Amino acid sequence: MGRGRVELKRIENVINRQVTFSKRRGGLLKKAHEISVLCDAEVALIVFSHKGKLFEYATDSCMEKILERHERYNYAERQLAGNADNSDEQVNWTIEYTRLKSKIDLLQRNHRHYVGEDLDTMSLKELQCLEQQLDTALKNIRTRRNQVMYDSISDLQKKEKVIKEQNNMLAKKIKEKEKEKAVAQEAPQLEQPNYRVDTSFLLHQEPLPTLNMGGNYHQQEAPELGRNDLDLTLEPFYSCHHLGCF
């Protein structure tokens, strides 16, 4: 059985699509180079990836020359087709388009060189010139970076100074408030008179003698500090009868 015809359609998987593009692009560029060498043909190939990246091939790296030849050929065909009325305008537009297209191609090629791509086709002199341009650009970038860092540090130092001043002012206000509060708490205590009574004399009094009618005289210790007991006990009158008082 013969191999069936494969339907061409967009590859949905992104990774597979990128891999296929890379393989097919290499094969396409290789075929363009082969037909240019084998058949002595001027070949110009331009390919844009889905991300907008440009890939191109031109015989002897003369893309601008081939594009100018293509524009002249198209212009000649348009003249033969009966567009002679607008020949001057078409010539001007063709020249302007060719000039702008060449400028765009040059800028895109320089951009690829700056990011380290497509360096195989460059000569030693071109590589040295590119290196010098990159060194100059790197110096300018470093100078600008240092300036931005210095300005940022200066701004941070100014902000730090302002914050310190604000903290000092707040600390001063807090101390003043605390001082006012302490003075306000001491003022009522100073206005109240001190009526404290000294009762120390009640704690060390000598004990008073106890008068006991009908008994012996003796001193008695005070049972409690600050209190004097006077015992005026009278014995019953009838007890004297037994003693022979009457």
Image: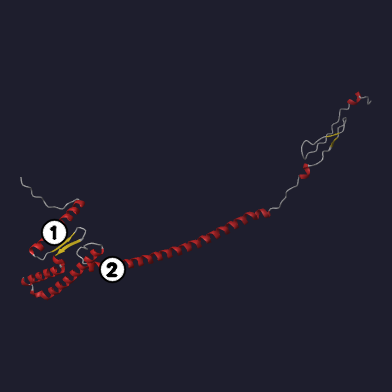
Name which residue type carries label 1. Answer: Lys
Q: Secondary structure at mark 1?
A: helix
Residue 3, percent across and down? 7, 47
Residue 184, percent across and down? 62, 56
Direction from residue 60 to residue 176 in the image, left or right: right
- Number of numbered labels in the structure image: 2
Q: Is residue 189 above or below residue 80?
A: above
User: At x 88% / y 25%, what residue is drawn?
Assistant: 239
Residue 132's disc is: 2
Query: Which residue extends farthest front?
Result: 124
User: At x 11% / y 60%, what residue is drawn?
Assistant: 34
Direction from residue 85 to residue 238 in the image, left or right: right
Q: Residues within 10 Å of mark 2 (few under 14, many from 20)?
A: few
Q: Is residue 26 above or below residue 241?
A: below
**Residue 132 seen:** yes
Q: Residues within 10 Å of mark 1 (few under 14, many from 20)?
A: few
Q: Are marks 1 and 2 in contact (CB under 8 Å)?
A: no
Please tell me which of labels 1 and 2 falls first in the chain: 1
Residue 30's disc is: 1
Residues 26 and 174: in front is 26
Q: Quadrant of residue 33?
A: bottom left
Name which residue type carries label 2. Answer: Gln
Q: Quadrant of residue 152?
A: bottom left
Residue 172, percent across and down? 55, 60
User: At x 19% / y 53%, what residue is drawn?
Assistant: 19
Find the distance from the CA under tag 1 to the CA under tag 2.
33 Å
Which label sits in the foreground, 1 or 2? 2
Direction from residue 42 to residue 120 in the image, left or right: right
User: At x 21% / y 51%, what residue is drawn?
Assistant: 15
Q: Is residue 218 above or below residue 83?
A: above
